[in-house]
Image (cartoon, rainbow, N blue to C red):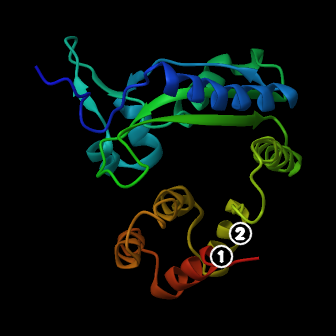
Amino acid sequence: IDLQPPKGTRDFPPEEMRVRNWLFGHFRDVARSFGFDEFDAPVLETEELYVRKAGEEITTQLYNFEDKGNRRVALRPELTPSFARLIMQQGKSLALPAKWFAVGQCWRYERMTRGRRREHYQWNMDIVGVEGVEAEAELLAAITDFFTRLGITAADVGIKVSSRKVLQAVLERFDVPEESFAPVCVVVDKIEKLPREKIVEELAELNVDQAAIDGILDAMAMRS
């Protein structure tokens, strides 16, 4: 019998579990100190939930299969789609603003690299019902507090801030139809994962012309 865990996963013997609990404890302490409530959702979700967000190609990155009831399901690769499903499920009964967080196990069937396994854990903090930038500012304050607690400084890490409003303004400037905004966002979300030529190809398939493609890529490359 093979005594090793499946490829891309890991065991947590007691000495490593203590470190994990210490780290997850900081996740939870920070979230609660900012007034967030913890939630969780099934590790197993419908495959459609992820296809709707990231497109059909996401299926190659999922642990997905057809269950005995002929339903297409997948192990969750991230927490955000489950969070969105739960928020929509609550409907008008949800008190706003809603501040939820989760620390959950996730799975991605991808090529492994250093520090990136197929099984991983994700800390999510989300705010719903705040129209201004106050929610983003609060989340930035929370992650900064987390780094401070761990002794991590600006010499160790940097924070990147993106805005869909910037992308929307670029599309409007180049007369890209409003209905193309969502599919363009799906492609833009892959910029750090795919080669530039692949991004250009996928944007062109959405009938985005070359001038608009250049404008999108230039905007996404801006640094403060």
Q: Quick check: 195 left or right of 139?
A: left
Q: Do the residues labelled 2 and 1 touch (CB within 8 Å)?
A: yes
Which element carries disc 2, helix, strand or loop?
helix
Give the x, y percent position of residue 29.
78, 26
Q: Residue at 63% x, 25% y: name it.
A: 88
Q: Quick check: 198 left or right of 94?
A: left
- Could you say which is closer to the camera, residue 72 or residue 160? 160
- Crowding at dot 1, Cα within 10 Å, few <14 / some 14-19 / many 20+, comes out as some
Q: In this view, does 75 lie above or below 95?
A: below
Q: Quadrant of the N terminus?
A: top left
Question: Which corner quadrant of the image does residue 89 belong to?
Answer: top right
- Amino acid at the residue labelled 2: Val
The residue identified by callout 1 is 170
Residue 88 seen in render: yes
Q: In this view, does 8 lie above or below 90?
A: below
Residue 35 seen in render: no
Q: Quick check: 56 left or right of 40?
A: left
Q: Residue at 26% x, 27% y: name it.
A: 5
Question: Which corner quadrant of the image does residue 143 belong to?
Answer: top right
Q: Quick check: 167 left or right of 82?
A: right
Give the x, y percent position of residue 47.
35, 31
Q: Is residue 172 above or below residue 61?
A: below
Question: Which corner quadrant of the image does residue 71 belong to?
Answer: top left
The residue identified by callout 2 is 166
Give the x, y percent position of residue 91.
69, 20
Q: Is residue 150 above or below residue 194?
A: above
Q: Residue at 86% x, 44% y: name it.
A: 138
Q: Residue at 57% x, 77% y: name it.
A: 216
Q: In which quarter of the image is the C terminus?
A: bottom right
- Amino acid at the residue labelled 1: Val
Instruction: Spot the residue most to the top.
Output: 69
Give the x, y percent position of residue 153.
78, 58
